[in-house]
Amino acid sequence: MVNVFQKKILIVAVYAAEIMMRNGAEIYRVEDTVTRICKAGRIKHVEVFATPTGIFVSMDSGDENDDPLTYIKRIHETGTNLSKISKVNHFSREFFDTDLSVEEGMDILREIDREEEYPYMVRTLAAAIVCSFFTVIFGGTIIDALVAVISGISCYVLSIMFRKLNINSFIRCFFCCGLAALIALFASSSIPGTSYDPIIIGTIMLFVPGAAITNAIRDFLSGDMLAGTARLMEALLIAVGLACGAGVVLKVWEMAGGVII
């Protein structure tokens, strides 16, 4: 029979996997973390199956007549926080190599999970800088870069508002990119020497799902076809949302008589 201690170990392992999955970890890393923590708790037989939307863990003591214990955790919202992934990964190795108790391990995981992101103003400033630099890289002028600062701040704030309202990523990217196109078109029509193309592209780069595409490829290479396909489709959906947002605004602007230079 699986004892109470091993059940607590299982809860710790799934909680660690949940933190990693919610912050954009690769599937193989999540499964390895669960296995490592369970092995530290002297659980002989562990089977882990993780997808971007759920974690399934089954364990037993190895006896023929033993009933396996299965734990399922649904993942609702994902993002990207490499710091939390690294800390949980380090925790799993520390838990395996040291004599940390279950309670101590759970406290460490809660502390990692509650860890705040960078301050709101710092993230907003970073978004503005990213957009302005990409605008210059894609052929924009200094004036275009200054407009991209306004566009980046506006779109990032809108994205945060949508995220707090639990609006899905497609709608969020659609409206954010539409707002970027609208700001760029207004700027190009009213400020001499301004081009809307690099401003839109520079702002879009803020929302391009680079981490999702990278993780999808890594999942494919490690043999996790289901997870790789799911993440690749998520990335494609976001890309379609970005393209549709800009395309709709450009078309409406043209139909309304606006000049597209």
Image: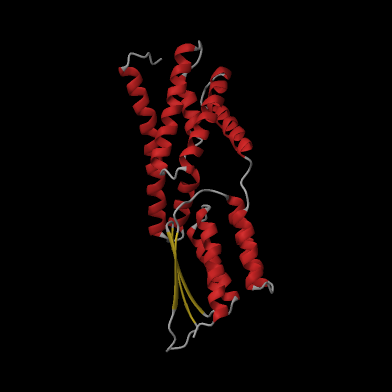
Please provide percent x and percent y for residue 156. 52, 34
Q: Is residue 8 above or below residue 55?
A: below
Left or right, 95 with respect to 71, comes to right
What residue sits 56% from the left and 23% below the top?
145
Image location (x, y in percent) of residue 100: 68, 72
Which residue lies most toward the front here? 165
On the rendered structure, is 173 left or right of 139? left
Q: Which quadrant of the view contains residue 257?
A: top left
Q: Number of callouts in the render?
A: 0
Give whichever of 182, 235 is nearer the camera.
Answer: 182
**Relative to the observer, which residue lies in front, 108 or 63?**
108
Residue 1 visible, this orientation: yes
In this picture, residue 167 sits left or right of residue 150: left
Looking at the image, the residue that sits furthest to the top is 192
Q: Residue at x 46, y 16 (%)?
A: 188
Is 200 drawn above or below residue 164 in the view shown? above
Q: Which residue appears at 34% of the width and 27% of the height?
A: 248
Residue 129 image point, x, y percent:
60, 30
The part of the image, by quadrant, that contains residue 91 is bottom right
| Residue at point 30%, 18% (across, down) | 255
Of residue 189 and residue 118, the one placed in the foreground of this image is 118
Indicate the quadrant where residue 12 lies: bottom right
* Res 136 visible: no
The structure's colour scheme is secondary structure
Horizontal and vertical percent position of residue 120:
60, 38
State which quarter of the image contains the C terminus: top left
